[in-house]
Amino acid sequence: MAYETIIVEIEDHVCLIRLNRPDALNALNDQLLKELARAMTEAQANDKVRCIVLTGSDKAFAAGADIKMMSEKSFTDVFTSDLFTDETAAVARVRKPVIAAVGGYALGGGCELAMMCDFIIAADNAKFGQPEINLGVMAGIGGTQRLTRAIGKAKAMDMNLTGRFMDAEEAERAGLVSRIVPAKELMKEAMGAAQKIAEKSMIATMAVKESVNRSFETTLREGLLFERRVFHSLFATEDQKEGMSAFMEKREPQFRDR
Ligand code: CO8
């Protein structure tokens, strides 16, 4: 079934997913989140895809959950429907690496969606924020949890309590984004990073993702043990033999995900 609120392209093993509700600054509504969840699940299942890039427009990655859609909802509506829960879980569940390429506004659910990705590359015009407090509510899909882990309590409290926006430079200083580039180079940079990842052994890139994410869920001792066991297991792969042989033979490795 064709998508209406996102655009999906696959180029050189990279799946590019572009949020596409320009009239609403890519505000996240039911349809968009359902389509995004489907695209992510399909990218995970597609053998040709080795890395995913999620982006929006020059003006907005996403300006939050769709306020028009939410405005009439009651407690019972949101509590019983698990608003957005399944769809966003599908995004966070993808095991292949996912890069968020953020230009313009990443606010509320938009900032939370970017944080569900593995790392964020920001354009110099990017603005991050959790302005739900201005609407009489609060973040609901990670803005008090993932943001606090990413930038610490002081800044997370500041952002969530005041609703102020953080520009790209502050976001990089705070550890929310991994790199900043001029806005017109955003997609080149993000696709370049994705191509680099796509050239590696996907067994190894998926193992890295799982291991880094484990650090948020466990103690240091358990995390180190998990990391060591995953490291050991990579010695059962042909890609480990290929990678190390290629280094010694001074040639580029040809990984085959085996
Ligand atoms: N929802 C719906 N429509 C939106 C949204 C939004 N979040 N953001 C922008 N739009 C629409 C505007 O209504 C406008 O539409 P129209 O032309 O029909 O009036 C169009 O996009 C352009 O917006 P503006 O004219 O406002 O553009 P500006 O450049 O003047 O301002 C801003 C851009 C600053 C981004 C401004 O639009 C803004 O403040 N938007 C709202 C930001 C916000 O509050 N986001 C948080 C939303 S709540 C949320 O995300 C909760 C997530 C948790 C869900 C939990 C589920 C369990």
Image: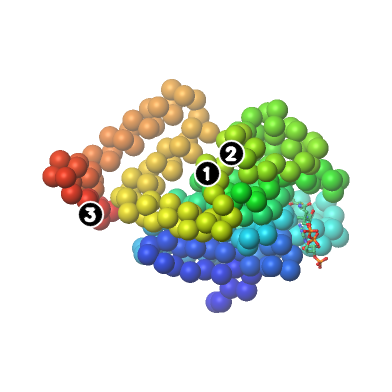
Q: Which residue is mark 2?
A: 172
Q: Compare marks 2 and 3 and give the one earlier in the sequence.
A: 2
Check disc 2 and give the amino acid type: Glu
Mark 1 and mark 2 residues within 8 Å of each other at the beta carbon: yes
Colour scheme employed for the rendering of this structure: rainbow
Q: Which residue is mark 3?
A: 254
Q: Quadrant of the N terminus?
A: bottom right
Of labels 2 and 3, the one closer to you: 2
User: Residue at the location (37% across, 43% down)?
Assistant: 207
| Among the 4 quarters of the image, the one containing residue 162 | top right
156 left or right of 7 in image:
right
Label 2: how many Cα within 10 Å (few below 14, some 14–19, many 20+): some
Check disc 3 and give the amino acid type: Gln
Q: Position of residue 45 (x, y in %)?
A: 42, 62
- Vertical comparison of 42 with 192: above or below: below
Residue 198 visible to the viewer: yes
How far apart in space, not on screen, are marks 3 and 1 (Cα)?
A: 28 Å
Residue 140 vs residue 247, the one in the foreground: 247
Q: Position of residue 139 (x, y in %)?
A: 73, 44
Mark 3 and mark 1 residues within 8 Å of each other at the beta carbon: no
Q: Secondary structure at mark 1?
A: strand
Check disc 1 and give the amino acid type: Arg
